[in-house]
Amino acid sequence: MTEGPDEVEIVKQFAANLYARDKQLATVESYCRDANEFLRYLAQFKMPLKRVEPETLLAFRDHLSHSEKDRENSVRRKIIGVRQFFRFLASEKFITMTPFDEMPLPERDDGMKKPLARGKIEAMLKGMQAIGLKSSRDIAILRLLAFEGVKANEIIDLQWKDFVAAQNKASLFIGGTKGRSIFLFPETAAALKKYKDIIDDWKGTRHDSTNEAFRNIFVSFKGKDGSLVSPKLTRHGLKFSLYEIGERFQIPHLNTENLRHYAIEHLLGEGWDAEDIMQHLGLRRLGNIAKHMARRRQDVS
């Protein structure tokens, strides 16, 4: 195998293979980033893929752990992505066998991280006002993440046709492999309605055909002052928005994972049982719900 453009083409074929296996866009992008990162690592040593051995992969894992100071689970996730890449290479005969067959995955840390304090997000939202396009968007996103448990990849793919608001009740269809319809808490519905009113007014000031492109619920903002509006929020844009909000309200490590846990706590606090929460979140097994239930029992005792 040669280096350079051929490897670029191989990663493209890897992406096509993942799509053919019905992998979600976020998963495809993540695995391809991992593959490209590994290829860049090999390029430092001018090593072709066919010469990769288990020791090379162990060295790459150490590189991730030490030079980038990645968290253990982050290193594990990247190794999983590269493992998928090598399985693809072997299946397509780019290499004769995958060296991952001789390399174990790093142990996964299944321990519960320290959660956000109860009431923290509610207090933060009281300090936010939906007076503009960005602020109203951020409030709606926070409510979907922290109280409805919607995931990051689901947030960025939501479209206005998925949101149905009646006088006393609102629902949201969430697509993807865990497709489902959920009824929203009144506060979430109100935040989405407010954001919709503001974005509709904003679109009304535009006199070009690009309004048709704004099908997604959440837009992104570009430029130093955020004056350029793009039709679709990206994962990076979502991550950066949460970072900005966390900095403003002095909540370190405000991210979608912490907010997902916060949502589980919220739903348990509302008296929901495990089965209802699983259905609302699109889960097939208890997972973190059971851990939260166990923690609540410990707190009581």
Image: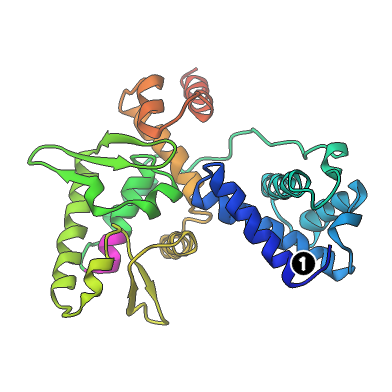
Instruction: Say if the magenta span includes residue 133.
Output: yes
The image quarter in which residue 60 lies: bottom right
The image quarter in which residue 226 lies: bottom left
Asked whether residue 272 appears in the rendered view, the answer is yes
Instruction: Say if the magenta span includes residue 143.
Output: no
Question: Relative to the observer, which residue lies in front, 237 or 47?
Answer: 47
Residue 257 image point, x, y percent: 51, 45
Identity of the residue drawn at 16% across and 65% down: 200
Q: Is 50 situated above or below 265?
A: below
Identity of the residue drawn at 25% across and 46% down: 162
The image quarter in which residue 102 lies: top right
- The residue segment tinted magenta is 132-137
Residue type at mark 1? Arg
Identity of the residue drawn at 14% across and 77% down: 205
Label 1, secondary structure: give it.
helix
Residue 72 image point, x, y percent: 72, 46
Q: Which residue is mark 1?
A: 40
Quadrant of the snapshot with the N terminus:
bottom right
Q: Is 65 situated above or below 189?
A: below
Question: Relative to the observer, which residue lies in front, 91 or 67?
Answer: 91
- Main SS, magenta region, reads helix
Q: Relative to residue 17, is residue 282 drawn left or right?
A: left
Residue furthest to the top: 301
Residue 165 image point, x, y percent: 14, 44
Residue furthest to the left: 167
Question: Relative to the observer, which residue lies in front, 34 or 297?
Answer: 34
Q: Relative to residue 51, is residue 294 drawn left or right?
A: left
Residue 185 image point, x, y percent: 23, 38
Asked whether residue 128 appears in the rendered view, the answer is no
Question: Relative to the observer, which residue lies in front, 228 or 94?
Answer: 94
